[in-house]
Amino acid sequence: MKIQKLPAEFEAARPVLQTIEAAGFEAYFVGGSVRDTILGLPIHDVDIASSAYPAEIKALFERTVDTGIEHGTVMVLDHGNGYEVTTFRTESGYQDYRRPDKVTFIRSLTEDLKRRDFTINALAMKEDGKVIDLFDGVTDLKNHLIRAVGDANVRFNEDALRMMRAVRFASKLNFSIDPDTMRAITKHSYLLEKIAVERIYTEFVKMMMGYQPQLGLRDMLNTNMVDYVPVLNNYLPAIESIIALPNFKLANDNQVWGLLSSGFALHSNQISSFLKQWKAANQTITAVQKITKAVLAFQNDNLDAMTLFQIGQPLLMDAIQVAQALEIPVDSERVLSQYEQLPIKNGHELAINGGVLIKAGILKPGPDLGRILKQLQAVVINGELPNDQPTLLQHAKVLLQA
Ligand code: ATP
Ligand code: MG
């Protein structure tokens, strides 16, 4: 197979490959960008693999950065673009079913392609568009199949994360997992317990953000993977309900966890424990708590000004997306105009602050100050008083006497 018209990203990178080849080495485009080009999908990063060792690459280009030199990756800077050039390598010493602790640089493309996870990810392309396809990846692309390179049982034993990657690509591309590969996943799903949660998190979120998240969830249920990732198997009926929804598209981490938390009907503290088990960042936990609160307010049709203020943007948009995915009726125009009409959108917009209250001799620094400011903020947000300084100073005195 030869790609006649290369996407602009590849065209821009061709001189880098040509420079490497002119020095007597091999160089190819590899991985996701080749797969996505054949599928006609947009590409993001262009990865290059080469027979040249890192030091040899560095000698060929004026500007390089050692982005991952111990794994054989050097970034070549060319006309304002950065290209990761990785030396062909094999991997060995997979311990505890995790990624290898030893990589060996080699000169053979074949050996490099053999270590890759799925046939559709093991394609290489020469700078002229000629595709090297050692494992029938192009046929699998045509048949919409995710199939392990080599013996699937061996490959998932080497690195159990590949099972999550299989469902991730199934969802991203709307592909099926090949029956042999599927059987191997079912047999080895328990090995996911050996994998760092952070790595499962990344693949899981990408899966949920894919084109067919429900297919990914179905695959996780069918293979029992759901039993070996945090928490999910406590909510199997809710997961079935999510799978039964019409197709939806999620745009970020917050939406993914917001959808699950709302779908599982979790309270604030349950969200916190759910997401801590997934090792989510604290910022994510807070965001998801807010989204879930908003979704509940949409559902109960009791969204008030204070809730809108606390949620804020862009989380309000995330909450609308999540509600729509869950088929919860939400009048998004009304909600957004309600938000736009809030007298203040964050605490700094309040016409008064601690300094003003102290200077006016109304309050001294201390716990009362914070309490009164919170109350002033609330009356402004609720539209009980205008956001102007003299009015709020006056009201502060009233509140203190109360
Ligand atoms: P995306 O478009 O989502 O970035 P990708 O195919 O580029 O998809 P990456 O995770 O960026 O996926 O990995 C780049 C390539 O490295 C893959 O296409 C695959 O060939 C190889 N690869 C990545 N992770 C593994 C793994 N755990 N085992 C084997 N090969 C892998
Ligand atoms: Mg990639």
Image (spheres, rainbow, N blue to C red):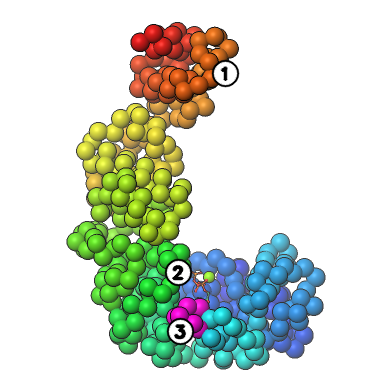
Residue 190 image point, x, y percent: 33, 77
Q: Nearer the viewer, residue 148 or 145?
A: 148
Q: Nearer the viewer, residue 387 or 79?
A: 387
Q: Secondary structure at mark 3?
A: helix
Residue 97, magenta (yes or no): yes
The residue carrying mark 3 has its beta carbon less than 8 Å from ligand 1: yes
Residue 368 image point, x, y percent: 45, 19
Comes first in the chain, label 1 or label 3: 3
**In the rendered image, the vertical position of residue 363 relative to residue 164, given as above or below:** above
| Residue at left offset 46%, top offset 90% | 135
Is label 2 in contact with label 3 (beta carbons under 8 Å)? no
Q: Which residues are magenta?
A: 94-99
Crowd tier of the residue under label 3, counting other residues whose Cα lies within 10 Å: few below 14, some 14–19, many 20 or above: many
**In the rendered image, the vertical position of residue 107 relative to residue 263, given as above or below:** below
Residue 185 image point, x, y percent: 34, 81
**CA distance separating discs 1 and 3:** 62 Å
Q: Amino acid at mark 2?
A: Ala
Q: Which residue is mark 1?
A: 355
Q: Amino acid at mark 1?
A: Gly
**In the rendered image, the vertical position of residue 24 relative to residue 29, given as above or below:** below
Q: Describe residue 122's horizontal placement relative to residue 165 as left or right.
A: right
**Quarter where residue 162 is shown:** bottom left
Q: Which residue is mark 3?
A: 158
Numbered disc total: 3
Q: Secondary structure at mark 1?
A: helix
The residue carrying mark 1 has its beta carbon less than 8 Å from ligand 1: no
